[in-house]
């Protein structure tokens, strides 16, 4: 044994530095792929779209889901009867699961049919009969699974059955069935379910026939059914008829509306009116499901192009192609210029183009932006922190990408939002409100002096356009070009509208009785009050800017900051004088903006959305005539007249319409912003091979510093190791002498 041991080399644990050297050498020997890839390497060339979310969706149940972070998912899963045309503007409706866009017929109070052009005041009921396409099937789901005897397999689950179930994917079997008209009726009934608290129930109960009474019926039935039970209660709505939503036959159903309400068609393009199968509702209502987050709020069931396969809101959510999707094709028509942008290259091809969409949780802008620049996100918005890196603004206000972005093949897409931010005058205020000529000229003077072009440039990085009225582009009734200019505030020039000079505002101010900003009767300076909740340090610059705008007329603006509840109280009581507000369209109809100045919709007394409490009998008369009309030249003329009245009275400083900026990589196709549609993922297409190539080019590992470190360490460490080993082999007496 002694001879054998002496013959072997001296084997001892290698120093840690040698292990580090070996690790460095292993790293430098790795393949050519990026080291910073945040996704599995096997998916690098896959047909997968990568996106993100910043806040978890609270509701994926279509009766409850409303916020933008929720419809990002529900819009791809559920299919209401209608949808918005992806490319056409102004926004227009097209069939989705329906065969056609329904045209209502009208009944009077006696039930007699009225002509299509009947006056709205004669219409007691509007009836919409909707026919859906046959052959549409739901995504695979355990709620539809049946056993050999044809019975629903998972509708009588026991505690033992659920002992090994932690997620929907743990159910072994799944099934499907055909979509039928009764599924749409079932969902409309769910809007009145006392457990769900649908955000649109209040509105719809005013229109859908007997829906308000139906809610009371369901409330009583629910209380009786749920008595003594904390969970696992199912109320079968098929046993409770609703007069306003009825099945005609397998593929047709009827919605009956009180009076005339043509805007119902826009609601039929939202997930609120998507089908929900009773089987799913019953499946999710079983005891033990809620504790496992196996609910419709967590795992939606739809007929759309995608289905939710991963729901981990603390990390990622995944949509995958629905294998049962019935098929749809990319639009064949668009707007002028769409073909030149490549937006019609896929015309007539079946959608969806993308197999899977991975949404990763990103709470901070900077990490998201860096991953986008590395090619790991396919599209991105532009935060204020990264704006200068992405976009340059020319002397004339034109927007273009920076050279860095151009070099990466990134494309910029912009669109004007269907929203408005405005500064309002309280019509009930004795100084700035009311119909007097002096108050009107005061408001007109301020409208000229407050330079929203400057505001957009300073605070929005040019991401907005000054509003000429209440209607943004893309909404029927909006006038573009010279026809749309508010000539009370702007002069029309060959270069475009130009804000009138301050001297014109000063002239109007003098006519209002405040020459040089002083009350002509008392000689006292004019002091106005701005009520706001914006009181933080980030708001100071904006408030200082607003003060300076009023100071151009020698008007003293006093900022009255308060908390949100106190501000709301002031608005409800009409004690605020000047305020700022905003509105985002629920649907692309002019009624959804013009009702903001409708007298009976005032904040004071009615708690409506007319925050200025504006009153003009002629405006109200025209609104009542316009609101339920089809989009015809006659309606356009009424809108023009209403806009002219509102401009003259100036209850608002019209403010601005924000612009949305988005960036798309070269491999990301068919991207056209559609601010009304929420089901547009099916139209998007990517080139995975190009993405993989560019990701590799942009994230190529730089190895030479590691090699240099490795060589340097070897030159330093190897002599030390040799010396150490030599000393270890010396006789003990030599080492200690």
Image (cartoon, rainbow, N blue to C red):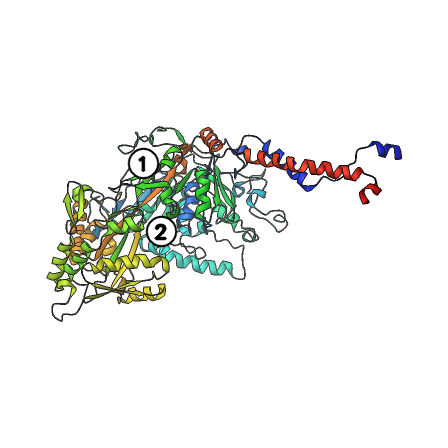
Q: Nearer the viewer, residue 256 or 521?
A: 521
The image's mark for residue 282 is none
In the picture, the disc for residue 87 is 1
Residue 275 showing in the rendered view: no
Give 734 or 224, whichever is nearer the viewer: 734
Q: Are marks 1 and 2 in contact (CB under 8 Å)?
A: no
> Image quadrant of residue 151?
top right
Q: Position of residue 517 (x, y in %)?
A: 16, 64
**Quadrant housing the C terminus:** top right
Residue furthest toward the bottom? 522
Percent x, y of residue 694: 45, 31
Q: Residue at x 35, y 51 (%)?
A: 243
**Taking 462 as reference, is 668 above or below it?**
above
Q: Which mark is residue 243?
A: 2
| Quadrant in the picture for the N terminus | top right
Q: Secondary structure at mark 1?
A: loop
Relative horizontal placement of residue 246, taking residue 613 as reference (left or right): right
């Amino acid at each position: 044994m002694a001879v054998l041991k002496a013959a072997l080399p001296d084997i001892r644990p290698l120093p840690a530095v040698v292990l580090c050297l070996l690790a460095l050498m292993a790293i430098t020997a790795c393949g050519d792929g990026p080291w910073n890839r945040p996704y599995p390497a096997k998916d690098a060339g896959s047909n997968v779209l990568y996106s993100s979310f910043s806040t978890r969706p609270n509701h994926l149940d279509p009766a409850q889901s409303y916020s933008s972070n929720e419809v990002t998912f529900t819009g791809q899963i559920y299919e209401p009867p209608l949808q918005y045309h992806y490319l056409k503007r102004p926004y227009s409706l097209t069939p989705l699961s329906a065969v056609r866009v329904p045209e209502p017929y009208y009944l009077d109070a006696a039930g007699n049919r009225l002509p299509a052009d009947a006056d709205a005041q004669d219409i007691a009921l509007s009836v919409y009969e909707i026919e859906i396409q046959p052959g549409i099937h739901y995504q695979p789901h355990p709620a539809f699974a049946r056993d050999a005897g044809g019975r629903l397999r998972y509708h009588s689950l026991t505690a033992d059955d659920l002992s090994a179930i932690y997620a929907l994917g743990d159910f072994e079997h799944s099934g499907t069935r055909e979509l039928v008209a009764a599924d749409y009726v079932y969902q409309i009934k769910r809007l009145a379910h006392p457990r769900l608290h649908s955000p649109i129930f209040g509105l719809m109960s005013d229109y859908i026939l007997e829906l308000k009474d139906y809610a009371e019926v369901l409330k009583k039935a629910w209380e009786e059914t749920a008595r003594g039970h904390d969970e696992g209660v199912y109320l079968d709505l098929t046993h409770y008829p609703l007069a306003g939503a009825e099945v005609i036959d397998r593929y047709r159903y009827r919605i009956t509306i009180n009076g005339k309400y043509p805007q119902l068609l826009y609601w039929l393009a939202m997930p609120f009116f998507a089908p929900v199968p009773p089987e799913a509702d019953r499946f999710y209502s079983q005891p033990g499901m809620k504790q496992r987050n196996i609910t419709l709020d967590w795992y939606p069931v739809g007929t759309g192009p995608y289905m939710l396969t991963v729901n981990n809101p603390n990390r990622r959510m995944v949509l995958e192609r629905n294998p049962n999707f019935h098929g749809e094709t990319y639009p064949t028509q668009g707007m002028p210029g769409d073909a030149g942008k490549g937006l019609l290259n896929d015309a007539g091809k079946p959608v969806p183009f993308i197999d899977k969409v991975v949404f990763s949780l990103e709470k901070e802008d900077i990490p998201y932006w860096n991953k986008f620049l590395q090619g790991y996100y396919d599209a991105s918005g532009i935060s204020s922190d990264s704006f200068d890196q992405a976009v340059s603004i020319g002397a004339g206000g034109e927007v273009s990408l920076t050279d860095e972005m151009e070099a990466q093949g990134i494309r910029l897409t912009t669109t004007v939002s269907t929203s408005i931010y405005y500064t309002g005058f309280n019509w009930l205020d004795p100084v700035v409100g009311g119909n007097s000529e002096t108050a009107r000229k005061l408001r007109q003077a301020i409208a000229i002096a407050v330079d929203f072009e400057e505001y957009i440039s300073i605070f929005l990085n040019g991401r907005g356009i000054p509003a000429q009225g209440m209607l943004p582009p893309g909404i029927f009734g909006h006038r573009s070009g010279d026809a749309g200019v508010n000539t009370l505030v702007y002069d029309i020039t060959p270069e475009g509208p130009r804000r009138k000079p301050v001297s014109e505002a000063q002239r109007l101010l003098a006519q209002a009785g405040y020459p040089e900003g002083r009350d002509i009767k008392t000689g006292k300076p004019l002091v106005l009050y701005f009520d706001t909740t914006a009181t933080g340090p980030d708001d100071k610059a904006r408030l200082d800017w607003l003060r300076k705008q009023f100071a151009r007329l020698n008007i003293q603006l006093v900022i009255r900051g308060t908390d949100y509840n106190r501000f709301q109280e002031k608005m409800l009581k009409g004690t605020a004088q000047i305020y700022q507000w905003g509105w985002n369209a629920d649907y692309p109809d002019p009624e959804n903006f013009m009702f903001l100045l409708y007298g009976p919709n005032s904040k004071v007394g009615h708690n409506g959305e007319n925050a200025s409490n504006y009153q003009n009998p002629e405006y109200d008369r025209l609104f009542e005539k316009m609101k339920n009309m089809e989009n015809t030249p006659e309606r356009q003329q009424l809108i023009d007249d209403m806009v002219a009245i509102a401009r003259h009275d100036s209850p608002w400083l019209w403010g601005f319409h924000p612009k949305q900026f988005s960036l798309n990589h070269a491999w990301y196709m068919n991207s056209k912003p559609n601010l009304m549609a929420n089901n547009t993922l099916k139209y998007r297409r990517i080139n995975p091979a190009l993405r993989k190539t560019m990701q590799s080019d942009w994230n190529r590992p730089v190895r030479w510093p590691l090699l240099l470190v490795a060589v340097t360490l070897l030159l330093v460490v190897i002599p030390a190791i040799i010396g150490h080993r030599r000393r270890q082999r010396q006789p003990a007496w030599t080492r200690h002498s």
